[in-house]
Image (cartoon, rainbow, N blue to C red):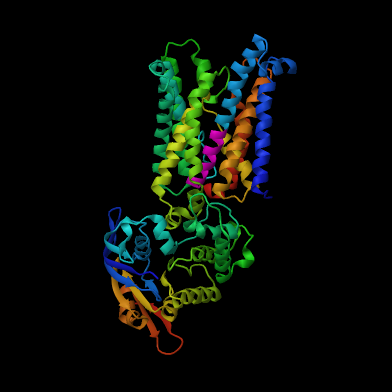
Amino acid sequence: MVSITLDQVGVTLGHRTVVRDASATFAPGTLTGIVGPNGAGKSTLARAMLALVPHTGRILVDGEPVAGMKRAQLARRIAYLPQGQTLHWPLSVERLVGLGRLPHLGPMSRIADSDEAAIERAMVRADVLALRDRDATELSGGERARVLLARALAVEAPALIADEPLASLDPGHQIDVMELLRGEANAGGLVVAVLHDLTMAARYCDRLVLIDQGVVVADGTPAEVLAPEHLRTVYGIEARVELGGDWPTITTLGRSA
Amino acid sequence: MTFSRPLLLAGLLALTLVAAIGSILFGPVSLSLGRMLATFTGHGDPIANAILLELRLPRMVLGLAVGAMLGLAGAALQGYLRNPLAEPAVLGISNTAALGAVAALYFGLSQLHPAVLPVLAVLGAMLSLGVLFTLAGTSESPLTLILAGIAVATLASAGISLALNLSPNPFAAMEIMTWLLGSLENRSIDHVWIALPCIAVGMGLLLWDGRALDALTLGEDGAQALGVELRATRLRLLLGTAIGVGGAVAVSGAIGFVGLIVPHLVRPLTDRSPSAILLPSALGGAALLSFADLAVRLINTQNELKLGVVTAFLGVPVFLIHLMRERRLW
């Protein structure tokens, strides 16, 4: 169990302030979606939570500031699925997923049976077991996205931050991935996902954080956050939002006037 | 085609041993097996003793050590920079180290203290590595790095030529070739003592970070999120490469392409992860350079061929083929 607290967090990259004054709390057992237009600062906020970019304000993991934390320690608490899918060496899928066990390995130790089991579990859950001997660089975009998700799952950390886990997935696999993230949260995990598909976000997330130009504009249930006036001011779109019932849908009607 | 790791290492070790024994057995002067045995059992004739113990033995040790260092440095740099074309000579590290050595030797600085020669070579290597790592941090393109390396290498080789031309040295032209193409001709046990400590430290530092290099397969963010302290890794890699390659180049000159060829030859025999090629690249480098050195001794030319000539003939085709495969570069 792990919780993450952001307290007036700001991030400046170069001379540009990308995130300002962001405060939020992420609790175990919840799936939180971070939504917002391109360039709003969603990924930067996610990276700040892993201390990958310097920040002002405070980011606490279980009450401890991430800024001073040892990387290996943080790596065992929060698994991270970065955006994009550049792979630099043609590793086999199984070997690649196995990289997720690095935070658990001692300095000179080899992969143990318990690590093998975790790798196996992660491949089963991300539905990539059949690909285990393939070269990860020769997979289709969707296959690779699932393999990289399996890599993040193999860490078996209590928290998972996934940056655009649905990118380049077909509708079927998008549902699989969201179900999987939902399952992680239901099992007590803390899951934060940067998402672009608002319907998917509304359907699976307990809570959404809407960001625009580096500022948290709204934070609450999908119904509260995805109000038509928010979509108008933040995304510049007119949309029909139907969140009641079993199948929430958000239909984009067009650009706001 | 993947061999089990013990099998691969055993095979490479055997190859290295063959190269080492070959370096002792063969040379421009042919000695009978009996005379060689006499020397190694302690009652050889003075000529055989001199040839074997003062010429061939240091040369064998240096061939193995310098080759191992270059192979390992190539493998580590390729892993860290995620660039299959990275290696000490292509990136200009060997040339700047050679420039440091030349400055030490031809301006009399090395006479002040024996450590000045390797220290200046290490500083030279560090200078180019600093430039390269800064560039690698700001640019994702592998091409930027190669171009910067070529620029640094060209500048350093111009510096070597200038230094040698300025120095009161009647053999300047020959010496320039030696430093730019590398040679193990006429190396003594003193050279061994200069190079070995540096190479031992360098190899130790480079073998440390296999895990971190594996994690870098996922990029810098991905690696850090897996617990890699990138700054410490970068520092160890920079120091390891600079000290090891600096020490090697200080005695052998800039031998090109060993660090490029060897990782490419061994990678298909492993699981292709950066950590898996480190040790095999060191062994392969030792064997390759020893065989190359054996070749320059046995090929009958008026002046002994420079080592870099042989390694370039082997390495440039590998380099070109790889460059063409990397279509994203065009």
Residue B191 as seen in the image, left or right of residue A68? right
Is B295 on the left or on the right of B181, as rendered? right
Q: Is residue A124 rendered to the left or right of residue A8?
A: right
Which residue is at the front of the view, B306 or A199?
Answer: B306
Does B182 appear above or below B72? above
Q: Position of residue A105 (x, y in %)?
A: 50, 55
Percent position of residue B270, x then y: 63, 48
Q: Is residue B72 magenta?
A: yes
Residue drawn 41% across the image and 78% down it: A205
Q: Main secondary structure of the magenta part?
A: helix
Magenta stretch, residue numbers: B68-82
> Residue A48 falls in which quadrant of the image?
bottom left
Which residue is nearer to you in this view: A74 or A171? A74
Residue at 48%, 46% (x, y): give it.
Answer: B209
Residue B269, x across and y down, in percent = 65, 46
Compared to A41, does B90 lie above or below? above
**Furthest-bottom residue in this view:** A245
Residue A144 visible? The answer is yes
Instruction: Tell me if residue B32 comes above or below residue A87 in the rendering.
Output: above
Would residue B48 be counted in the magenta stretch?
Answer: no
Displayed quadrant of residue B186: top right
